[in-house]
Image (spheres, grey):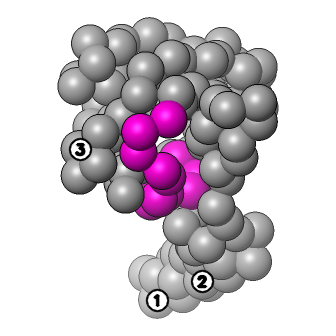
């Protein structure tokens, strides 16, 4: 029994360290907002959650959300954005463009996976 507990603890530590060093532990570190030809593009990776999970973008300009998937087989591929009535299963690999119109200041956008385990928020300032 002691050997089994020891193995489980060791595996948990190895997995935790791998997540931290792969960038999965700091999902809000990388901003992914770009303005091209007067349109704001916000890119979010959907794979094992959403990255970044907190983003700040400008309000008052046309905005498109780009959901990127790269071999996503988990529930983050099932995206729900209630405020705009969006619900879709994203492709396992590819990009899905979602037109957000012209967001207003102080009205954040929140997306969640189909199971409610993962979420992301875009704050418009």
Task: Give the residue at x 28% y 18%.
Answer: 84
Q: Answer with the quarter of the image where residue 81 lies.
A: top left
Q: Which one is closest to the eye, mark 3 or mark 1?
A: 3
Identify the mark nearer the N-term, 3 or 1.
1
> Which residue in the structure is indicated by mark 3?
107
> Which residue in the structure is indicated by mark 2?
13
Q: Are the two marked residues, 2 and 1, in contact with CB atoms closer than 8 angstroms? A: no
Q: Are the two marked residues, 3 and 1, in contact with CB atoms closer than 8 angstroms? A: no
> Which residue in the structure is indicated by mark 1?
2
Reply above or below: 13 against 118.
below
Crowd around label 2: few <14 · some 14–19 · many ≥20 (10 Å): few
- Is 33 left or right of 12, judged from the image as shown? right
Depth order, front residue of 103/109: 103
- From mark 3 to mark 1, how far is it between C-alphas? 52 Å
Task: Give the residue at x 41% y 45%.
Answer: 59
- From mark 2 to mark 1, how far is it between C-alphas? 17 Å
Residue 14 in view of the camera:
no
Residue 55 belongs to the span the image colors magenta: yes
């Amino acid at each position: 029994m002691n050997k089994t507990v020891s193995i489980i603890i060791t595996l948990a530590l190895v997995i935790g360290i791998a997540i931290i060093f792969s960038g999965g532990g700091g999902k809000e570190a990388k901003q992914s907002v770009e303005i091209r030809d007067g349109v704001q593009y916000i890119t979010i990776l959907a794979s094992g959650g959403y990255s970044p999970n907190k983003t700040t973008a400008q309000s008052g300009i046309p905005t498109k959300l780009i959901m990127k998937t790269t071999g996503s087989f988990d529930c983050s591929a099932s995206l729900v954005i209630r405020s705009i009535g969006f619900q879709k299963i994203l492709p396992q690999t590819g990009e899905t463009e979602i037109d957000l119109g012209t967001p207003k200041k102080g009205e954040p956008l929140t997306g969640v996976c189909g199971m409610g385990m993962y979420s992301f928020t875009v704050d418009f300032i």
